[in-house]
Image (cartoon, rainbow, N blue to C red):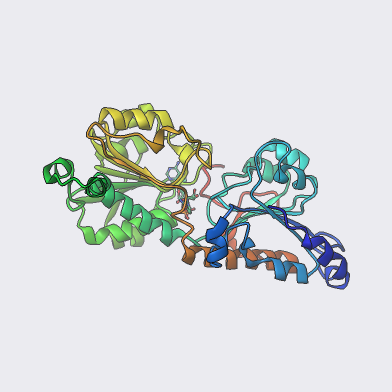
Amino acid sequence: MLRTTARNAFSKSNVASQRFSAGGSRGLKVLAILYKGGSAAKEESRLLGTVENELGLRPWLESQGHEYLVSDDKEGSGSFFQKHIQDADILITTPFHPGYVTPEVFKKAKNLKLCVTAGVGSDHIDLHTAVENKVQVLEVTGSNVTSVAEHVLMNMLLLVRNYTPAHEMIERGDWNVSQVARNAFDLEGKVIGTIGAGRIGYRVLQRLVPFAPKELLYYDYNPLSPDLESAVNARRIDTVEELVSKCDVVTVNAPLHDGTRNLVNADLLSKFKPGAWLVNTARGAICDKFAVADALRSGQLRGYAGDVWDVQPAPKDHPWRTMKNPLGGGNGMVPHYSGTTLDAQARYAAGTKEILENYFKGQAQNPANVIVGDGKWATKAYGQRK
Ligand code: NAI
């Protein structure tokens, strides 16, 4: 979807544009790649992360003399994204429908100075090249971490309690309690571990405490402070292999980077407790899709749930759409939406505006939002480096 009104507004707003010097004495070209909302977005204006509702930024950006181009068309060399990235100053995109900024795209993007992730997780941008090219990468840190943590808890419960097959049985008109109860358990008394104990991982641990697990474990090369650890009674495990071997339920809450891509592969899955449950709302590419489907089919995993896929939108034949455990359940997959509740959209739209405003005014950014600063890594969450 292409909106061209920005060009007209731009020509009328020269005076305003002079005020913004971050990109010189002109208004800037801001390109946003968002997902198509269709009739839902027309009926629900709080679906801010859509091409229809444009993060609510158009009137504000245009009133300042900037050009704002919005589209969901992002695949292939002839796409809107590939065409307009060539002279865009700023790219805004969401992890839900990301414009992938590969090293090749960076080569074309001659004016690009700032990439803003409307949400959390900036792995769709080649961050090494962003550092080299001095392109800043910022995200709206914290904007949807509670939304995701709630989703993780829901996923654990629906897998452990065998909820989906039970509901499907009711829709079919059947009633067979033992058929679903034979694979239903309690979360209470289980060993539960998170790979990554940052904002989301820690919130998951906090929310698990009232369920009285046997033990809460985590693996993260950035250890929690003793105060945070003791507040949730969690224990750090030295290696990811050891963590998965101890857990009944594992959840992945680390960003996608060189050290986590394909981390949960056939080898690591073979080290899980037989019949464990795995929840991944972090990024699809952290798990090997075929190895996960095989592990579920064999019963090595009793269930897998999450909302993230490699790539997005997920192809129709992606094995995670239909994979099942030997009893015909254990699949809790949904489209990528855990972090895009209407509450989260309000927060990441407001956060995106704040980042842009700071940039236009040359003001300091909230350090927590900066993934790549001016030619430097600003975060410690995307892998260990010297
Ligand atoms: P965060 O930066 O607060 O925490 C990430 C933690 O993971 C850090 O403590 C880091 O040290 C740790 N980590 C990194 N590599 C690791 C590794 N190899 N092993 C163990 N721990 C490792 O990030 P936050 O806010 O908790 O988000 C985490 C990720 O969740 C995001 O990067 C994003 O990919 C995903 N996410 C998914 C959403 C969804 O809608 N499904 C929405 C928001 C985030």
Tell which residue pokes out farthest to the front in this image. 173
The front one of 11 and 26 is 11
One can see residue 113 in this view? yes
Tell which residue pokes out farthest to the left in this image. 178
* Vertical side of 266 occupied by 147: above or below: below
State which quadrant residue 361 falls in: bottom right
Q: Is residue 54 left or right of residue 334?
A: right
The residue depicted at 30 percent of the width and 29 percent of the height is 297
The residue depicted at 30 percent of the width and 38 percent of the height is 244
* Vertical side of 335 occupied by 9: above or below: below
* Vertical side of 272 occupied by 215: above or below: below
Q: Position of residue 71 (x, y in %)?
A: 67, 52
Q: Is residue 32 left or right of residue 280?
A: right
State which quadrant residue 116 falls in: bottom right
Q: Position of residue 9 (x, y in %)?
A: 81, 67
* Vertical side of 34 occupied by 19: above or below: below
Q: Is residue 73 left or right of residue 238?
A: right
Instruction: Report the quarter where the C terminus lies.
Output: top right
Q: Position of residue 195 (x, y in %)?
A: 38, 45
State which quadrant residue 139 falls in: bottom right
The front one of 357 and 179 is 179
Q: Position of residue 52 (x, y in %)?
A: 62, 60
One can see residue 260 in this view? no
Query: How many tags in the picture?
Result: 0
